[in-house]
Image (tube, rainbow, N blue to C red):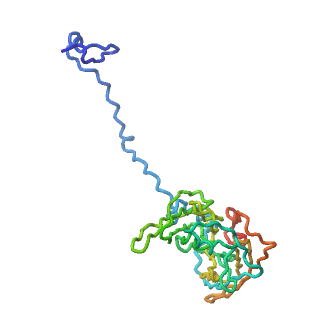
Amino acid sequence: MQASAITFAFGRSLLPFGIALLLGGCEPTPQPPPPPRPSASIAQQPTAAPAPPEPTVSGAPIALRDVEAATNPGRLPPYDGPTGILEGSVRIAGDPAPEVPLTLPASCTGAERTYGRLFREGENRAAADVLIAVTGYRAYIPVRGQAVTATIKDCAFSARTFSMTFGQHMEVENLDETNSYIPVLQGSRFTAFSVAVPKGREGKPIKSDPVRLYPHRVGQYELADNMNRPWMSADVFVLKYPTHTVTGIDGRFRLEGIPVGDVQVDALLPSADLSESKKITISAGKTTELDLVLRFDQKTNRGKTRPHPIQSAAASSTPTAADVK
């Protein structure tokens, strides 16, 4: 056996295997003493369980306590008293909506119907995309549903104004056969990008989930597309109460479950920065009709200036008209 093949450590010396046999025979290498055994009191102490995750809402990374602080700071019980219905319409008076110059590719010419003018009008000057909000009642009404739906067709969103209650999320679905989109919620700190894939041609459908977008606070956001289609835009209002809606192309709106009593109705057309307010009385089990008129003067109304902020952080438990102005 060659002496230099293997070495062992003795104290501070490194000795060839053969010499070690001569000096000390086959002495085993000294082993370190075993570690001390834990005392019974230490060994019996239970391991602390990890803290459970904080509850969130609507599948979103938003703490439930943040939603409750904004939507029900007074910790009121859910309202279960008598309610009524508000129904009505909004129309435009004054000048027609001016044209907005657009440069659209061949695959997006349908977008001109949505974005080709400063605001959309239906028959008989019906005002589309008007935010309707009812405030002034003293009650807490829980959020209605988890999601607000938006669709995309012909390079245009299904509306130019959307309203949500804080705690909800938005689901964006692509109805186009071939175009893809990346919908984003400008202003939200949750900015992960997801592709809204096309639904596919007839006979060759493509199955996909809608893109989910999450506003992180009460306020105003912009729904946009992150694939170089700058005309695709919609105002998204995230409010701290659920008594809100948006008019369709027919200018109509309907709100159910409004607590009885005197309330204020605010109407806002963001793209033209037009607004109107009315005080009405809601009666139990009855439908209150309300027709509103927004007057547009092209000389004085030049459209909105972004952003159009909403009061949020320091708001009281009772919604007011300031929440939508």
Q: Nearer the viewer, residue 308 or 180?
A: 180
Q: Residue at x 60, y 82 (%)?
A: 256
Instruction: Work out which residue is located at the far right of the displayed protein and give it.
Output: 299
Q: Is residue 86 above or below residue 141?
A: below
Q: Is residue 169 left or right of residue 201?
A: right
Q: Quadrant of residue 104?
A: bottom right
The quadrant in which the C terminus is found is: bottom right
Q: Is residue 157 left or right of residue 5?
A: right
Q: Is residue 19 left or right of residue 277?
A: left
Q: Quadrant of residue 296?
A: bottom right
Q: Residue at x 35, y 40 (%)?
A: 40
Is residue 33 visible to us here?
yes
The quadrant in which the N terminus is found is: top left
Q: Residue at x 30, y 16 (%)?
A: 10
- Measured as percent of width and height from the top left, residue 61 is found at 53, 59
Q: Residue at x 61, y 89 (%)?
A: 285
- Measured as percent of width and height from the top left, residue 86 is found at 64, 84
